[in-house]
Each structure stands twice: as C-alpha cells, then as structure tokens.
Amino acid sequence: MKEALSKIDASELALNDKLIYINRVAKVIKGGKRLSFSALVVTGDGAGHVGVGMGKANEVPAAVSKAGAVARKYLVKVTLAGTTIPHEIRVKYGAAEVLLKPAAPGTGVIAGGSIRAVLEAAGVKDILTKSMGASNRVNMAKATVQALSQLKDPKAELARRKPQAAEKVEVPGG
C-alpha cells in the first residue's frame, strides 16, 4: 500500500469514512480476558480518491479514528472512465485475489463486502467484480485499492507507448 508515488493531501478533499469491519480480540491474562478492538475503515471522496486503513485500540471509537487516520495517510488516485474503470484488472494481495471488470452504464456496483465499500468510496458507479481465493476482509479491501491504483488511462498509455499513433487512433469508451 506504500507504493503511492505522489502524496495526496487529504485536507483538500471532502472525504467520507465508512466502517467495513470491527474485530474484537481477547487476550487471556491471569485475571481473565483483556478485550481490544481492531477496525477496518475505507475513506474516499466519491470522485477518484480512496484509501483503506486498519486501527487497533482498547475502545471501538479510538480504533475507528486510528483506522481513518491511516486511510487518509495512504490515499490513492483512481483513474475512471466515466462511471466505470478504463480496463479489466486482476490483483492478488496475500491469498485474496480480486478481479475488476468495466461495465455498461446502469449496471451498478456488482460486488460484495469490503470490495463494494472501497468501490463506492472511490466513486465507481458501474463495475463487475469477482473475489477469488481467501475471503479475508482486510486483504480483499487492500487488493481492491491496489487494483484501483494500478489502473491506467488508455489514451495516456497509448501516447506513452507510441507518441505518433496517439493522434491517429481514437480509443473507444474513453
């Protein structure tokens, strides 16, 4: 998640936090059990910026605020093509694998769990997804953010590869 090249200033964006998951952890000690909480939070502006963070604390609100701070720290820019993504992408993070496919306008977000939360926070309206491998919420969310950060604009990529061909070829859906 630390592969972001340029730092995105979170103070300039209108970010919304969404809690994906809270995990209660019990540590057995001499006097009984000591409870602590870990929270998984996604933050995004709904216009192409999204981040996922994990926070741990002895109380739920503290864990959620820590997770939100981590999510703001590691924001990524998402390349969008209208209401969907520009191309299909498949990313593996740990044992969780996520496949994201562009969809026609009006399709909606066909996703579940943490993948849906990340895509909605990023502002994607039409997309098809498939979760393969492990169903670990944390790894699925991180794989989704990683996939969104690796998306490239087709016109810019074509111009980078073939500078003279960029003016001649019209890219569909862009």
Image (cartoon, grey):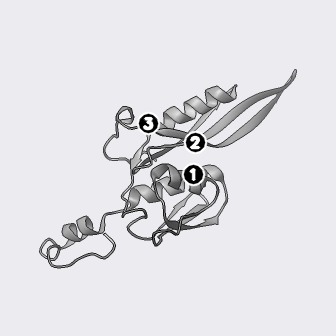
Q: Is residue 45 left or right of residue 159?
A: right
Q: Residue at 34% across / 40% down in the picture?
A: 8
Residue lying at the far front of the rendered structure: 106
Q: Position of residue 174 (x, y in %)?
A: 31, 69
Secondary structure of the residue carrying tag 2 is strand
Q: Amino acid at mark 1?
A: Ala
Q: Position of residue 133 (x, y in %)?
A: 64, 65
Q: Amino acid at mark 3?
A: Lys
Q: Is residue 147 above or below residue 21?
A: below
Question: What distance separates the C-alpha of mark 1 from that of mark 2?
Answer: 7 Å
Q: Is residue 140 above or below residue 16?
A: below
Q: Are marks 1 and 2 in contact (CB under 8 Å)?
A: yes
Residue topped by disc 3: 73
Residue topped by disc 1: 117
Mark 3 or mark 2, which is nearer the start of the sequence?
A: 2
Question: What distance separates the C-alpha of mark 3 from that of mark 1?
Answer: 18 Å
To which quarter of the image does residue 162 belong? bottom left
Q: Nearer the viewer, mark 3 or mark 1?
A: 1
To which quarter of the image does residue 128 belong? bottom right
To which quarter of the image does residue 35 belong? top right
Q: Nearer the viewer, mark 2 or mark 3?
A: 2
Secondary structure of the residue carrying tag 1 is helix
Q: Residues within 10 Å of mark 2 (few under 14, many from 20)?
A: some
Secondary structure of the residue carrying tag 3 is helix
- Closer to the camera, 22 or 104? 104
Residue topped by disc 2: 18
Q: Amino acid at mark 2?
A: Lys
Mark 1 or mark 3, which is nearer the start of the sequence?
A: 3
Question: What distance separates the C-alpha of mark 2 from that of mark 3?
Answer: 15 Å
